[in-house]
Image (spheres, helix red, strand yellow):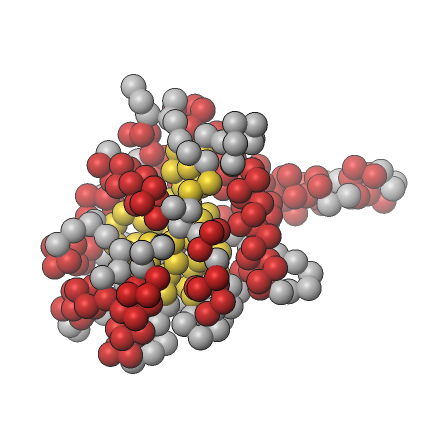
């Protein structure tokens, strides 16, 4: 299956996972090496469990104020170059029988796309994307609804669209409000916009350094019932501790987004390994000095962590036996 950018194929891939009780993992990236770590994790997991065409989403933000990942890819900081380069890199790594990760069904995703700042990516990158998050959370509810509806009407035939009703917590310890009309607003938003996925506020924190957030499973079930089908996307999954992932798909959460904690932990691991090479570096040993050793340590640790996440999300159920 390899590089998946066709809307119908991506939809069918996600639906097949949901049918087996699996919430599809959406891993973000801000570098070539973390993109490969995503594919490597999925491929390793598939080999161990006997899974064909293992599905995973490779995601990237562009000009998102809290974390413009595409700008981080290159030293020049050009979001367009960074975004296209990483998506093409994923295609090279997965497309064709000789590609190292051809057993991975890599679905690509534009995350937190602002209607104005990211207009170029929202309208010009369909050949590199299977889905986008049309992020109108900075706008008043009615304006967000209108803009999202217009985008789906114009481009929805080409691409899967995530929508979001209102602001999400970003590393500040906030939890979702329980005493508002959120579910009613969400149901109206989905009915009027016809988005494919709804990014739901389920108590998690984006870009959080902690793992003490509490997943609001009851809210997820209530939302899914109100929406009439499983279509929830959860952001900030890495803010959750072990044991909070097992009911995602049952509750209607069919995509789970994670990145920050994985990057922090793999960076710290690679840094410790780098410090252990200081003597060799001072002795001018090339392999110790050159960046490849640090990058490979980063890739290997991130891939291992992502494999563990795939297990938590129930990916074992995708095994053919």
Instruction: Judge by depth and name the residue closer to the eye, 28 or 308.
Output: 28
Q: Residue at x 51, y 36 (%)?
A: 94
- Image quadrant where residue 73 sits: bottom right
In the displayed structure image, the side of residue 255 where residue 32 appears, left or right: right
Query: Which quarter shows the N terminus?
Result: top left
Q: Is residue 179 above or below residue 131?
A: below
Instruction: Judge by depth and name the residue closer to the eye, 208 or 117.
Output: 117
- Image quadrant where residue 284 sits: top right
**Looking at the image, can residue 34 be seen?**
no
Instruction: Judge by depth and name the residue closer to the eye, 59 or 280.
Output: 59
Q: Residue at x 19, y 43 (%)?
A: 250
Q: Is residue 239 above or below residue 100?
A: below
Q: Position of residue 85 (x, y in %)?
A: 60, 52
Q: Position of residue 20 (x, y in %)?
A: 24, 34
Query: Which quarter shows the C terminus?
Result: top left
Q: Position of residue 69 (x, y in %)?
A: 54, 60
**Looking at the image, can residue 48 be seen?**
yes
Q: Residue at x 27, y 47 (%)?
A: 254
Q: Residue furthest top?
A: 321
In the displayed structure image, the side of residue 182 where residue 8 appears, left or right: right
Q: Position of residue 110 (x, y in %)?
A: 44, 58
The number of numbered discs placed on residues in the rendered structure image is 0
């Amino acid at each position: 299956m390899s590089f998946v950018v066709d809307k119908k194929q991506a939809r069918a891939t996600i639906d097949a996972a949901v049918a087996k009780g699996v919430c599809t993992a959406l891993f973000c990236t801000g570098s070539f090496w973390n993109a490969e770590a995503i594919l490597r994790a999925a491929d390793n997991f598939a080999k161990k469990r006997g899974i064909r065409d293992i599905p995973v989403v490779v995601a990237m933000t562009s000009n998102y104020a809290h974390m413009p990942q595409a700008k981080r890819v290159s030293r020049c900081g050009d979001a367009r170059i960074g975004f296209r380069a990483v998506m093409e890199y994923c295609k090279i790594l997965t497309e064709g029988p000789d590609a190292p990760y051809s057993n991975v069904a890599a679905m690509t995703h534009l995350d937190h796309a602002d209607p104005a700042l990211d207009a170029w990516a929202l309208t010009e990158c369909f050949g590199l994307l299977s889905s986008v998050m049309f992020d109108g959370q900075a706008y008043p509810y009615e304006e967000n609804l209108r803009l999202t509806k217009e985008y789906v009407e114009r481009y929805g035939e080409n691409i899967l669209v995530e929508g979001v009703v209102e602001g999400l917590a970003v590393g500040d310890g906030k939890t979702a409000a329980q005493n508002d009309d959120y579910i009613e607003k969400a149901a109206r938003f989905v009915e009027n916009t016809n988005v494919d996925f709804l990014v739901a506020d389920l108590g998690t924190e984006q870009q959080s350094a902690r793992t003490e957030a509490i997943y609001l499973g009851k809210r997820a079930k209530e939302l899914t019932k109100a929406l009439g089908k499983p279509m929830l996307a959860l952001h900030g999954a890495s803010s959750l501790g072990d044991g909070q992932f097992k009911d995602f798909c049952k509750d209607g959460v069919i995509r789970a987004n994670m990145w920050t904690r994985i990057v922090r932990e793999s960076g710290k691991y690679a840094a410790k390994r780098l410090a252990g090479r200081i003597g060799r570096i001072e002795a001018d040993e090339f392999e110790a000095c050159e960046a490849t050793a640090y990058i490979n340590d980063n890739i290997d640790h991130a891939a291992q962590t992502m494999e563990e996440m795939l297990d938590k999300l129930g990916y074992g159920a995708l095994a053919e036996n």
